[in-house]
Each structure stands twice: as structure tokens, then as C-alpha cells.
Image (cartoon, rainbow, N blue to C red):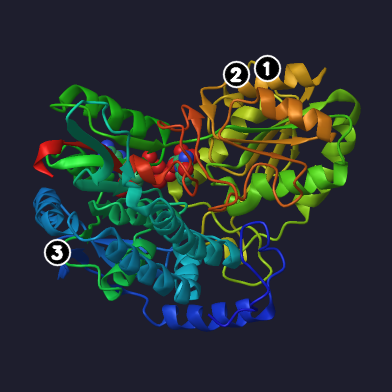
Amino acid sequence: MGSDKKFKLTYGTMYSPPEEFHTSFESNLADLRKTFGQEYSMIIDGKEVSADEKIENRSPINTDQVIGLFQKGDDNIANAAIAAAKKAFLHWRKTPWQERVRLLRKAADLIEDRSYYIGAAMSLEVGKNRMEGIGDAVETAELIRYACEQLEKNSGFEIQMGSDPFVGLESTNRSVMRPYGVWLVISPFNFPGALTGGPAGAAMVAGNTIVMKPATDTPLTPYLLAKAFLDAGIPDGVFNFVTGPGSTLGNTLVNHPDVAGVTFTGSFDVGMGIFRNFAQNGRYVRPTILELGGKNPTIVSKHANIEDTALGIVRSAFGLQGQKCSACSRVLVEESVHDELVERLVTLTEKLAIGDPTERNIFMGPVINKNSYRDFQDFSAELLSAGRLLTGGKVLTDGNYAKGFFVTPTLFADVPFSHRLWKHEMFLPITTIGKIKNLEEGMQIANDVDYGLTSGFYGSDEEASWFFENIEAGVNYSNRPQGATTGAWPGFQPFGGWKGSGSTGKNAGGVHYLQMYMREQVHNRVRKLSDF
Ligand code: NAP
């Protein structure tokens, strides 16, 4: 991929990439722009499939730009994709795991080779800045590789168990892990690479066949992943890519009796709806991996290094326009350092470059769509009547901003902790800052939400140990200037949530994840010793 060998891209290192990253990104972006308006198919059973109706994929940077035309899949499409996956499962489940690993590794390599192009797609359709875009593409490859590595390290999860102590008989036991069948992957708009390709890769290497349905706002990235799976030689029907609205196509897929398991990443309400539906209407319990929202706090002690704290909070609050599930949306700071921190936060926030995120020096792009744009205005107005606006609170409409969904990074202070927006995931670049009397009070407020995805802490190392002991969240950071609550990377910080942020308590890109795509089977074999 033409990058400096010594440089390893992660969300922690992306702030100072080698020059080649920029030149490669720019040439791939130029190539991608030449394809604007092109029509993209779905892929079912290895074949390109169209629907009667199309959906325009317009860029949130400039809604005049039609990135591509995508298919509006319906019930027939859902049924065809599931039928193809069901048929392919018959042979894919018997394919030796070593061969599955080989094919998935090849797909991961292709995704990394194409990471600048895929990153450019994300910059255009999600509004990610260029490093976030490339980062998501490389993370996708790393998640797939991590799943392959886990299968290999555990020798396909085939384990010899104890032999029963029978007299005159040999009774051996073997535990094996088997795939479930057709696995559905439904992904959100904000990480269309990692959160489509990651679960899809894990499900496939474990021996399941998949149907993936991405968010309607961001179908191009998952299409490019589907092409990489195809080009890697993954057999027809093992993966199927369909596009269309969640409320119709997604709903039909979820409720299909031939779906054996689902990985849904998205909002709490939709995820819980799927879970309740599965429980009520299914003939039996099916594995449901839910990765949902967050309301991620950062607790700041009077012993914190204020410069690192401010930098980490600003990066996590406003990276990807605050539209990360891991975004820092709450800051809880000890009284004695409150004003000093607020001053640094405002200064750093006002320096952030907002604009077309494909450009080199832009940090913050647009929010994803009209609904988010409207929510930003409504939430800002609501908070204004409850607290003190420190900076932001405006939409940007002049000049280059006129045709996109651009808003300003926004900080509020003095909003009473009883206000509903201290607990509601706004999913926007709005962060509230509250004064706490001591760290215990901060911890109580931090944990007093239904979510438990990520969190951050700044203070002494001893206090950090106390923080880790008491915080109720899946991914937790202390004293990290690269990001207070964001930046997870496979193999470094596996990603997943507690409480309303996730259903399994096992994090993607970690050692406990892959097994969720397999079910245990025990083989007991008894032989008479006299037979030998
Ligand atoms: P969303 O509105 O819940 O949509 C997620 C996906 O579900 C989309 O593909 C959507 O399709 C589909 N969908 C909608 N209704 C459906 C239904 N009734 N049945 C089946 N599928 C349905 O979420 P989003 O706005 O894309 O993403 C933002 C949310 O995701 C935030 O809450 C964020 O915190 C969360 N998130 C969590 C994680 C994590 O790892 N925990 C990571 C990223 C994002 P359409 O696009 O066609 O509606």
C-alpha cells in the first residue's frame, strides 16, 4: 500500500501519518470522483442483482453530489439472499477451517490494499476526515485478520476432553465448535467498513454464511468490501450483499425463519426492537449480537494534566462530528480545575477546522443527514434554555458549507444533572460539562445511565486504578491525549459495551469474540477394549 513500513496506522497514531498517506488518498479520491453517479448492484450467490427501484447515495458534504445509485431491495431480495446463504452453508460449513482462514486472509489483504479508495468512499459518504476514513478501512482488514488468528491459535477450537473412567471400555470425549448457519449482519452508517466487514469476517471464518445489509446512507463502502470478498475467491452464496431500507428489507431479513443469528450494530431502539422481536416471534432462541449506543463520560480529577485532558476530550467529542458510538458526550470535572479545563476546551474547540473532510487539513466534516442536522438544532436550543453555551451551537450555511450538513462543535456548561440530555445519546458534536464535588460523585453520575460503552479518566495513576475498578463500561482509557473515550483498535483495545450498549459482554477484536459465531458440540466415542 505504499506506506512507511515503520508506521503502523491505528486511531491512536493517525494524527501524524507519513506523507505517502496523503498522496495515495488524493489519487484514489480523484479516481473515485470519476465514478460519481454510477449504478451499483447487490451481490447474491456471487451474481450481480438489481432491483426495480433505486436509492441515490448523496454526499453529506454537498448534497448535489450523487456518489452512486444503489438498489432498493425488497422482500423478494431478502428471500433470495437468505436462500443463497442457506444453500452455500451446506458446503462452507464443511470447508476445512484452514481453507476458510486462507480465503478470509486474502480478502483482508485486498481490503488493506484498497484502503485508500475505501477510505475515500467513507470520506465522501460518511463525511469522515481522510485519516478516519483510511483508518476504518484498515481496521476492517485487521478485524478479519484477528478472527483468522484466533481460529488458528485455537486450532479450530477442537479440544480433547477427559476420558470417562469406565472399566473395560475406552470412552473419549472431544469438544468441537460448529457454525450456526445463515448469519445476518446489519451495520450503521458511521463505521460502514469495520462494522460490516468485521462481523462478516468473523462469522464467515467460523463457517457461517452471511447476508449483509448496510445503512442506507452509506452503501458504497460495504459494496467495496463485498467486491473484495468476491475477488478473494470466497465461494458464491457464502456472502451476500443487499441494500435497502432497514424498516422494510432489514425487517424482513431479521424476521426470516432461516436466519440462525444476527449481528446488529446501531441505535439502542432499533437493536432492542430486534431483540424483542426475536424473543417473541422466533421458534427458539437465536444468538443476537447487539452493539448499541453510548453516552460516554470522561471523569477529570484535580490531579489531571489539563493539556492532555483537553486534547483527549476535544478529539473524542468532535472526531467524526461526534457521530461515534464512543464519542465523549459528558465531561465530569472536579470543581477546582473546572474553569481551567473549560478555558482550554473552548480554545482547542474553536481551532478545529470544519469543512470538506476529504481536504487534508480538515478535522470535522458534516453530520450525516437532514435528521442529524435538525436534531443538532433542536438539542442546542433545548440545552441553551437549561445551561450556558460555551462555544458552538450553530449550523454553518455560507459559501462551501451551503450544500452540506455542517454544524459547529458545541460545548455546554452548568446544565443541571437532572436534565434529560445528560442521559440521552444525542450522537452529535455536543458535549456537556458538569462540575463534581469529588471523584465519587463523578463515578456515580458516570454510571447512572443505561449505556456503558466507553469512558475516560484523567488524574493520578493510583486514581486510574480506582476508576477501572468502579466504572461500568466495556472500553476504558486513562490519561490518553490521543482520545479520552475513542480510538479502540483490534488486538489493542477490543471494542464492546456493557448494559444497554451491547448484549454479549464480549468485545470485537478481542480473544472472546469469535466463539460467539460458533456453538459447541461434544463427541463422546465409546469402544470396547476387547475390540482392539
Ligand atoms: P440505526 O438507525 O439503528 O440503523 C442501523 C442499521 O439498522 C441500518 O442499517 C438501518 O438501515 C437498520 N435498520 C433500521 N431499522 C431496522 C429494522 N426495523 N430492522 C432491521 N434493520 C433496521 O443506527 P445508525 O443511525 O445507522 O447508527 C448510529 C447508532 O449506532 C448510534 O446509536 C451509535 O451509538 C450506534 N453505534 C454503535 C456501535 C457499537 O459498536 N456499539 C458502533 C457504531 C454505531 P437504514 O439505514 O436503511 O435505516
- Residue 193, located in which quarter of the rendered image? bottom left
391 or 68: nearer the viewer: 68
Q: Is residue 528 visible from the viewing direction of this image?
A: no
Q: Position of residue 128 (x, y in %)?
A: 54, 60
User: Is 449 situated above or below 409?
Assistant: above
- In the image, taking residue 329 as reference, residue 373 lies left or right, namely left
285 or 273: nearer the viewer: 285
Q: Position of residue 227 (x, y in %)?
A: 30, 71
The residue pinned by badge 2 equals 448
The type of residue carrying mark 2 is Asp
Helix, strand or loop at label 2? It is loop
Q: Residue at x 9, y 55 (%)?
A: 87
- In the image, taking residue 12 as reference, residue 266 lies left or right, namely left
Q: Position of residue 421 (x, y in %)?
A: 58, 26
The type of residue carrying mark 3 is Asp
Q: How many marks?
A: 3
Q: CA distance from mark 1 to mark 2?
A: 6 Å
Task: Tell me the quadrant of ligand 1.
Answer: top left
Judge the density around disc 1: few (<14), some (14-19), many (≥20) Cα neighbours within 10 Å. Answer: few
User: Is 290 situated above or below 243?
Assistant: above
Residue 444 circle label: 1
- Residue 476, located in which quarter of the rendered image? top right
Mark nearer the viewer, 3 or 2: 3
Residue 194 circle label: none
* CB under 8 Å between discs 1 and 2: yes
